[in-house]
Image (tube, rainbow, N blue to C red):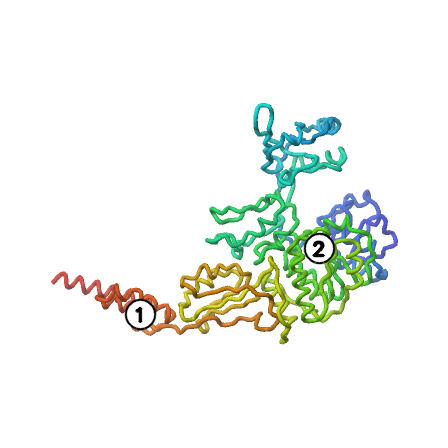
Amino acid sequence: MKDFGFYSAGFSDVVLSDGIEICGDEEGAKNEEFIVANSPKLKAQIYAPQINFYIANTKDEPLVIAQNVDILYEAAAAAFDGALYSDHQKPVGKNVILACDEPQEELVALLKQHGFKVIALSRDEIKFVYGEIGDLSVSISGKEGEFEVQSDFFLVRGAQAYQLRQSGCYEISGLKDGEILEILQSKSPVYRYRNSTIFDPAICQYQGRRNDLCAKCVEVCPTVAILKNDEKRELVFSHIDCIGCGECVSVCPSGALKFAKLPQRVFGEIAKLYAGKIPLLIAESEIASAPAVQLPCGVLPFGIFGSKQIDEANLLSAMQESGSSVIVYGADVGESTREAVELINGISRAIYGKDAVFLARNLAELQEALKQAQSSQPWAFSLNEQGLSKKEIFSKRVSAMVGDGSFGVVKSGELLKFGKVSINEASCTLCLSCVGACNTGALYADNSDNSIKFNASLCTTCNYCVLSCAEKDTIELEPCGVELEPGFFNYKMLAKDELFKCIECGKEFATSKAVMKIADMMGAHFANEPEKMKTLFCCGDCKAKIMIKKQIEDARKGAM
């Protein structure tokens, strides 16, 4: 397998580096396989349409084009190397249910001619569809009542939203009969797919928690790829039903969901390749329908992600690693992406007096963004994101922009939330339940000084710390914006206590407040048992010794 292949039809005048093999026709390249290619006419692991999009539209000089094409190939190869998906496949038969109010004799005949079994119905007869490709169950209402029919595919003209949430269900309005046949043949007898997401339950703010605090990924999923089981308090994933839009990733507050094709760590590494360039973030799925537009010198498309994947961490990585303005183009970006753009621009305006990100949803907005975007901006900063969570990346990158300055407060939105925790030291026993409840690292137990510390920039306002506190009216959470001053991004002490020393051996074993609270609670019960009362002020080892000694003495007294 060779690294990079370039299908040159239509680009005869392009000069490329020696590391890219140029193929003039499909026949000549049919025995070659590449890691990255610019066209689906070549056999490759990665098809990178952003390469052709750039060459066709850029105003860069020929030498610069060659250099930038190298970057696009390297970026696609990095995505291939860093992807976290795995390949899956499922056998799929040829049973089709066709729902349409108009007769479709020609389509039915064509499908039957190619071995498909077709049941044609009107849309009113379809009551519900569930399951997945190859195992669909269609609820049908007929003269004899309601009954279910099993099918591999469900085709419909004028579908209702619920009818397209499962894999194997297709809206065929606007498609020619031959195109419909091609879709079915590409998915039968074997349907191949990949997982689009990677899930880390350890930092999920729904999975395994006692309270239903978050399930934003389920709310935004346009299919049944993510569902929640409230009884077991767990998320249920169906990768075969996922369409790879990435909105669940962008809306996840803690970063528990990662886009398998382009995880944040890989996104950050690719962004480093764009140093000195102006990144044009455009989803691969939208490049084919993107309008022809002249790209000014220095603008380089970055097109390796899901259409709704972009979040605040992605934006910060792209703008800081490139040192330039960032353009996000997409007719259907998610609400979380729009909110992230507003937040980052609010921060940028407060610190630098200008926007850092331009969101374009049509040709006119894209042309305007291309006029305003600039390179060599003051926010340039490089960060090694290896091992960092989404919240940590945000914190470190914005902290670098703030430096030692103070620039006021930027309001956060409904999806991107920040909060401040306060603790009543008088009633806090430092049991650390709140620390254990926080899975973003916002609350931290510092053993060096026996304290609880808090970093507001890592808080998602999930409120689990408050719900987990054993003491009444001890911990409070107040939503806030992003405070652009150094203290917002550093840990502050909320509560502290001295360690209590065992009255027998002198070993420190618990906080003084915790020991005294237990002693106050149990004192009345142990008032006539001095040995038990004494154990309340002892470490575990000495506690056991005292009780064993008491048992031995009681046994001796009983024997006398």
Please indicate whether residue 163 sits to the left or right of residue 470 in the image. right
Q: Residue furthest top?
A: 144
- Which mark sits nearer the N-terminus, 1 or 2? 2
* Residue 95 point in image, percent of width and height: 64, 30
Number of numbered discs on residues: 2
Q: Quadrant of residue 395?
A: bottom right
Rendered residue at 83%/50% (across/down): 8
The disc labelled 1 sits on which kind of residue? Phe
Instruction: Tell whether 541 sits left or right of 49.
Output: left
SS at mark 1? loop
Mark 1 crowd level (few <14, some 14–19, many ≥20, 10 Å Cα): many
Relative to 58, say whether 32 is above or below: above
In the rendered view, would you say 232 is above or below 497? above
Residue 118 seen in the figure: no
- Can you tell which quarter of the image residue 155 is in? top right
Name the residue tied to disc 1. Answer: 537
Estimate the spatial distance between the alpha carbons at disc 1 and disc 2, rounded to whole Å. 62 Å
Residue denoted by label 2: 77
Which amino acid is tagged 2? Ala
Secondary structure beneath dot 2 equals helix
Quadrant containing the C terminus in the rendered view: bottom left
